[in-house]
Image: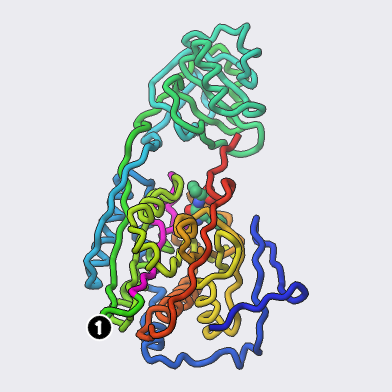
C-alpha cells in the first residue's frame, strides 16, 4: 500500500475551519493515476452504488428532526432496521440510556395590549411552566443589579451579556421572579443553553435584540409566558447494527471493519446532511456489499445520541470485548457527506496522522479521481471513541462546512447527488480493498491510543 508522501516544502496546507488539512502530494499526472479497478467485484460495487437510493433515504429521514431519545429518533431507528432487513441482514437495535433534555413542544409569550410579533425560543434546559406577571427591567441580571428590585411573582426582562444565561435565570429566580426573558445584544435571534438542569430554574425564553428592545416600552404591563412539554430526565436512544460475516471459511485474521454514521439530529434541524447523509450512505454500502466475497467481518452501525456527546458510539465501543477491540481494524465514520454548499471531501483523524483508513481511502480516491483525498485533524464525531480505543478511525466530511449546519435549513434541497456518489465510491472501494479475500499477510498495524482534547469533544456553551 502506498503511504501518503508529505514533505515540508511540498505538502500543501489548506486552512479548513479550525483544522488544517495536509494534501498528500500527487505522484503521477491525473490521467495516468486513473487506473482501472482490476477486481471484478470492485467494478460491481462501483456500478451498484446509487446516489439516487442514498438521496431517497435522506429525503425520508429528514422530514423531521431526529433528536436522541424522542419518538422521531425511534421512528428513524425502525426505518433503518427495516432497510437493513430488506437487504437480507439481521439488524440488532442496541438501546442505551442517558440523562437528557426534551425541548418544549410549544412556547408562547404575550404582553397585554402589545401588538408586535414575538417569537420566543426556549433555551436548552428551559423548564416548562405557565407564568404571568408584571414585566420588570432587570439589566444584565447580575446580582448587584437585582438587589434593589422587587421581582416577586414578576417577569424579568434581561439583556444578554457578561454572565451566562443560567446565572441570569438563577439570579432572577432567587429574587422571586416567576419567569425570565433574555434578549439578544447582537442582531438576530437568540438561542443557547442553560448548560445543565437546575431545580431552581423558572420558565425562561429568548428573544431577538429587536423584539427585546421593543418590549422596553412595555415595562409594567402584564406578560404571560407558557412553555409546554420541556423536561429533563432519563431517555433511551439506540444504535442499529447489521453484520456481514466473512464469507467462506473462517478468515485467518478474523478482522472486523466498522462503517458507521449517526442517525440523530439536533433539535429544529431536519439534519439532511448532518447526518441523514451518512446514515443513508451506510445503508447503501450495506446493500451493495451484502453479497461480495470478503474474509473480513463488516459491521454497519448507525449511532444514536451523537449530538448530545457521541453517546451512541461511546456505548457501542464500551460493549466490545478486548478481543473484539483488537480485531476491529478500521472505523469509517460518515458524517455530513452530501452538502452541495460545503467544500471538498476530507478525512479527519483524532491525532491528525494518517492511518489504515486514510491510507485505504487515499488509494481508492486516487484510483477514482486521480488524486488522494486529503486528511487533517478533527474530533467532534463518532470516530472519537474508536480512536481512543486504539482503532484506526477517520471522519469523512466535506470541509469547510455548509452554512446550514445545525439550522432548520439543513434540508434535502441542499444535498448533492454528485458528492454522495463520489464519497460512497471512495469509501465503498476502500472497505472492499480491506475486506476482500486476500488475508494472507500480517495483520494491519494498530493506531496508537489517543485521547481527545476536551475542545474537540464538547459543545460550545453560548453566552
Ligand atoms: N457533524 C458534526 C461535527 C462536525 C461539524 C465536525 C462540522 C466538523 C465540522 C457533529 O454532528 C456535531 O455537531 N458534533 C458536535 C460535538 C458533539 C460532541 C456534541 C459539535 O461539533 O458541536
Ligand atoms: Zn454530525
Query: What span is in magenta?
Result: 254-276
According to the picture, the residue beneath numbered tag 1 turns out to be 248
In the image, what residue occupies the spot 36% across and 82% down?
48
Number of labels in the image equals 1
In this rendering, is residue 396 above or below 229? Answer: below
Front one among 138 and 251: 251
Check residue 237 for magenta coloring: no
Front one among 277 and 384: 384
In this rendering, is residue 209 above or below 347? Answer: above
The image quadrant where one finds the C terminus is: top right
Picture coordinates of residue 19, whole percent (x, y) = 64, 59
In the image, what residue occupies the spot 46% across and 15% down?
178
Q: Quadrant of residue 199?
A: top left
Front one among 349 and 326: 326
Report the side of 284 relative to 384 (left or right): left
Picture coordinates of residue 433, whole percent (x, y) = 43, 81
In this rendering, is residue 373 above or below 165? Answer: below
Front one among 187 and 102: 102
Amino acid at each position: 500500500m502506498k503511504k501518503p508522501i508529505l514533505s515540508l516544502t511540498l505538502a500543501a496546507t489548506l486552512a479548513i475551519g479550525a483544522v488544517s488539512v495536509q494534501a498528500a502530494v500527487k505522484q503521477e499526472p491525473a490521467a495516468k493515476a486513473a487506473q482501472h479497478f482490476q477486481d471484478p467485484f470492485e467494478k460491481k460495487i462501483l456500478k451498484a452504488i446509487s446516489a439516487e437510493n442514498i438521496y431517497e433515504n435522506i429525503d425520508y429521514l429528514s422530514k423531521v428532526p431526529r433528536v436522541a431519545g424522542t419518538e422521531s429518533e425511534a421512528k428513524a431507528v425502525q426505518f433503518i432496521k427495516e432497510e437493513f432487513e430488506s437487504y437480507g441482514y439481521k439488524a440488532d437495535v442496541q438501546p442505551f440510556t442517558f440523562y437528557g433534555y426534551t425541548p418544549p413542544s410549544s412556547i408562547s409569550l404575550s404582553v397585554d395590549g402589545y401588538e408586535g410579533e414575538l417569537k420566543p425560543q426556549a433555551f436548552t434546559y428551559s423548564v416548562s411552566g405557565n407564568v404571568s406577571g408584571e414585566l420588570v427591567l432587570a439589566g444584565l441580571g447580575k446580582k448587584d443589579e437585582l438587589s434593589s428590585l422587587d421581582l416577586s411573582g414578576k417577569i424579568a426582562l434581561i439583556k444578554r451579556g457578561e454572565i451566562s444565561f443560567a446565572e441570569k435565570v438563577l439570579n432572577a429566580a432567587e429574587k422571586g421572579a416567576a419567569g425570565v426573558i433574555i434578549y439578544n445584544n447582537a442582531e438576530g435571534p437568540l438561542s443557547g443553553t442553560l448548560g445543565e438542569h437546575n431545580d431552581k430554574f423558572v420558565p425562561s425564553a429568548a428573544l431577538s435584540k429587536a423584539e427585546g428592545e421593543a418590549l422596553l416600552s412595555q415595562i409594567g404591563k402584564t406578560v404571560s409566558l407558557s412553555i409546554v412539554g420541556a423536561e429533563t430526565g432519563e431517555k433511551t436512544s439506540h444504535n442499529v447494527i447489521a453484520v456481514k460475516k466473512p464469507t467462506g471459511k473462517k478468515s485467518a485474521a478474523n478482522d472486523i471493519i466498522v462503517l458507521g454514521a449517526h442517525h440523530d439530529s439536533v433539535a429544529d434541524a431536519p439534519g439532511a446532511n448532518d447526518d441523514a447523509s451518512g446514515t443513508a450512505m451506510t445503508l447503501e454500502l450495506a446493500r451493495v456489499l451484502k453479497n461480495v466475497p470478503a474474509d473480513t467481518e463488516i459491521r454497519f452501525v448507525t449511532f444514536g445520541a451523537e449530538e448530545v456527546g457521541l453517546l451512541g458510539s461511546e456505548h457501542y465501543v464500551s460493549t466490545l470485548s478486548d478481543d473484539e477491540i483488537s480485531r476491529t481494524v478500521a472505523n469509517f465514520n460518515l458524517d455530513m457527506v452530501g452538502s452541495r454548499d460545503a467544500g471538498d471531501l476530507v478525512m479527519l483523524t483524532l491525532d491528525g496522522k494518517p492511518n489504515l483508513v486514510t491510507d485505504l481511502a487515499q488509494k481508492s480516491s486516487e484510483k477514482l479521481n486521480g488524486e488522494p483525498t486529503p486528511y487533517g485533524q478533527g474530533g467532534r464525531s463518532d470516530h472519537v471513541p474508536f480512536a481512543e480505543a486504539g482503532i484506526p478511525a477517520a471522519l469523512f466530511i466535506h470541509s469547510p462546512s455548509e452554512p446550514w449546519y445545525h439550522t432548520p435549513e439543513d434540508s434535502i434541497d441542499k444535498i448533492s447527488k454528485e458528492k454522495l456518489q463520489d464519497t460512497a465510491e471512495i469509501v465503498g472501494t476502500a472497505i472492499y480493498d480491506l475486506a476482500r479475500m486476500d488475508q494472507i499477510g500480517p495483520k494491519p498495524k494498530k493506531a496508537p491510543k489517543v485521547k481527545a482534547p476536551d475542545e474537540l469533544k464538547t459543545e460550545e456553551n453560548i453566552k
